[in-house]
Amino acid sequence: MASTLSGLRFQGDDNLQSMLVGTVMRKIKSRTWKKQRYFKLQDDCMTIWYTSKKAGNTHSTFSVSDVEAIRDGHQSEVLLSIADEFPADRCFTLVFRGRRGNLDLVTESAEEAQSWIRGMRKLIENLENMGEREKLDQWIGDWFRKADKNNDGRMNFKEVQDLLKMMNVDMNEHHAHRLFTMADKSQSGTLEDDEFVLFYKMLTQRDDVLKVFQEYSVDGQKLSQSDLEDFLREKQLDGVDIQQHAKQLIERYEPSDTAEGSIFNPQWRGVFQDMSQPLCHYFISSSHNTYLMEDQLRGQSSVEGYIRALSRGCRCVEVDCWDGANGEPIVYHGHTFTSKILFKDVVNAVSNYAFKISEYPVILSIENHCSVEQQRVMARHLNHILGDKLLKSTLDGKAPVGLPSPEDLKRKILLKAKKIGGLEESFNGMVEDSQTGEVSDEDEVAEINEDNLHRESVCRRVKKSKQRLSKELSDCVVYCKSVHFSNFKHSRIHSKFYEVASFTESKARKHLREAGTEFVHHNSRQLTRVYPSGFRTDSSNFNPQEMWNAGCQIVALNFQTAGEGMDLNDGLFGQNGSCGYVLKPSFMREVEKRFDPETPEQRDGYQPVILTIQVISGQQLPKVNIKEDAIVDPLVRVEIHGVPMDQAKQETRYIENNGFNPVWYDTLRFTIHTPELAMVRFVVEDYDKTSKNDFVGQYTLPLGCMQQGYRHIHLLSRDGTGIPPSSLFVHIRITELD
């Protein structure tokens, strides 16, 4: 079993041996909350057990696979707050996947801290290097241990029946007992390690895959290279060197029975797009209220928000700046009960994490509410902390004629904020020490009230005061000057390429509805930022697809909020090396082209396609209902997100009481008029005839990144993290509409 293998693999490793014995550590939640807890690595080398008083439990566990990274020292806000009490060499932070909070720990000695830091990193590395077979063995082993209630290393039939319910299987008792008996080679009335693996294999016999195999196998027993080439050519529509590809697949997968093709085309995983075009020609992964970990009324502000967003490939983060105590600017959601953090701590976090995932430029979108004095402090922090990373002048030192490219701006941080005068004046030396200018257009409270004057309950008109800007902060703004937007005609005649307008989602929709072609044209020349309405006090997200349809580049979402909006964002930016920049289609980049998302059939190069998806089966779907006897009744919904004409969704029927290996063979068809902008979202739900269906898993990707033929879709949780080995098996065909 996997646990035995793990134990053998790590024998002789002092760090892991120390973790297996266990360690008493302090769990830190704040300056005042510090509790001693006993942490121990379980024998499976995959689970951490610890004492806990939460909800009356005596202990809790988490899986090593839940941990994304280990930060040593004072690399979290919580540990920074107690830095004067505990030295850095005794502190470390476990960062979990998804939106789960960090675990901050302090050991009694530096040696103990190092044992856990090195040991955890080794365990994570081992997990990442596991093959598919090993991962499956590990997963089977986890279920074996859960079902083996008396911990005797064996499972009787009653334990197997309980296990089947835990695994989402509602199986006929007679059939289950027949499989149990067949697997019980020792005839002991129980299943041991290897016998349980055999039972699992019989349970997971894939008739859907066998059917495809037998269609192309000459003798029904094996697939020759010639058979495989026919399959790749006819079913998978493989466009590469078929013979070479077949040979590579055989060499890679022949010893394995888990070979499978992912739906995401591996050719589009790395950076494959032209990165030398102007910034305005790209969609840019962007965050709204980046400092917030929860809602925008009472939520916690944290530098962790910046670290998490940047670690997910976000390239534009928002910083709301206000005057703070002791002359230090602070960041929080103004006029609310959200907590406050120091501006300099935000800049430090951005400096440390900006380029760990992507080398392409990061934009700091500043909402400035500070006095001139504290603006000067902001400028000092930006210059001192960011140093050469901060872009302070045009790339060639001359007056620019257009926006630079992501390639030109690699490892540079740009400030988007108000600026005194334009770039031209900067080169002519015409800017005085300070000058009067309007308050930032990103003042969302003002915009919300102006947008909604008819709502008396919320609307007192906020009068925009004149705000003085410091030259020092103004000088930090080069290619992203925030400006007020009048109308498209005014912009076409007067706007400069380096000027950026910001819209609430409602204003952006209004412009899109009234002048879609003009909006797309505007965005072919300069950057536009769109952000959620201030009425979204729960920090929910709008559908970003609407704004991408208009060519808006900086579509800012609440990264802390899971759901459809972030699924689409993760899906779009999962391509091109997850670098945070995706090149817009050519008809949205070329000024002479005319594209209206409402009438896509009128554009040059219009070629609709038919997308046909046969949803064949599902594998090991997670249990979503906490009731022990409840089994998932899964259905699959396929959603198309794109221009209005392409918006569509269709569902399979639901399969009663089978989340383990449901089979549909249902075919869904969609006509897609603008495939270049279309996103495809697969959603699995637990059908409920009396109330809303429960979410089971999802996977979202651009239509252009889909591989045709028989493919597996590895499902993601609501948080966007993997839930292996849960998957869907589908057949994809994309054909041009005559």
Image (tube, rainbow, N blue to C red):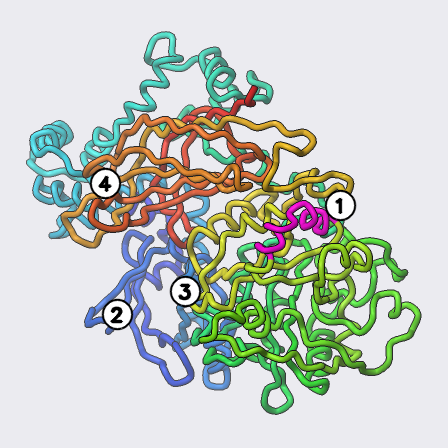
Residue 260 image point, x, y percent: 42, 29
Q: Quadrant of the C terminus?
A: top right
Q: CA distance from mark 3 to mark 4?
A: 42 Å
The residue pinned by badge 2 equals: 51
- Residue at the extreme top: 218
Amino acid under disc 2: Thr
Q: Nearer the viewer, mark 4 or mark 2?
A: 4
Q: Secondary structure at mark 3?
A: helix
Q: CA distance from mark 1 to mark 2?
A: 54 Å
Please name the residue shown 53% across and 75% down the image. 333
Of pointers 3 and 2, the one earlier in the residue sequence: 2
Q: Nearer the viewer, mark 1 or mark 2?
A: 1
The residue pinned by badge 1 equals: 276
Q: Quadrant of the N terminus?
A: top left
Amino acid under disc 3: Trp
Of pointers 3 and 4, the one earlier in the residue sequence: 3
Magenta stretch, residue numbers: 508-524
Residue 168 image point, x, y percent: 21, 42
Q: CA distance from mark 3 to mark 2?
A: 17 Å
Q: CA distance from mark 4 to mark 1?
A: 49 Å
Of pointers 3 and 1, the one earlier in the residue sequence: 3
The residue pinned by badge 3 equals: 116
- Mark 3 touches mark 2? (CB < 8 Å): no
Please name the residue shown 16% across and 39% down the image. 192
Judge from the rendering whether residue 325 lies leftward or rightward of residue 143; answer left or right: right
Amino acid under disc 4: Asp
Q: CA distance from mark 3 to mark 1?
A: 44 Å
Q: Main secondary structure of the magenta part?
A: helix
- Mark 4 touches mark 2? (CB < 8 Å): no
Magenta span has 513? yes
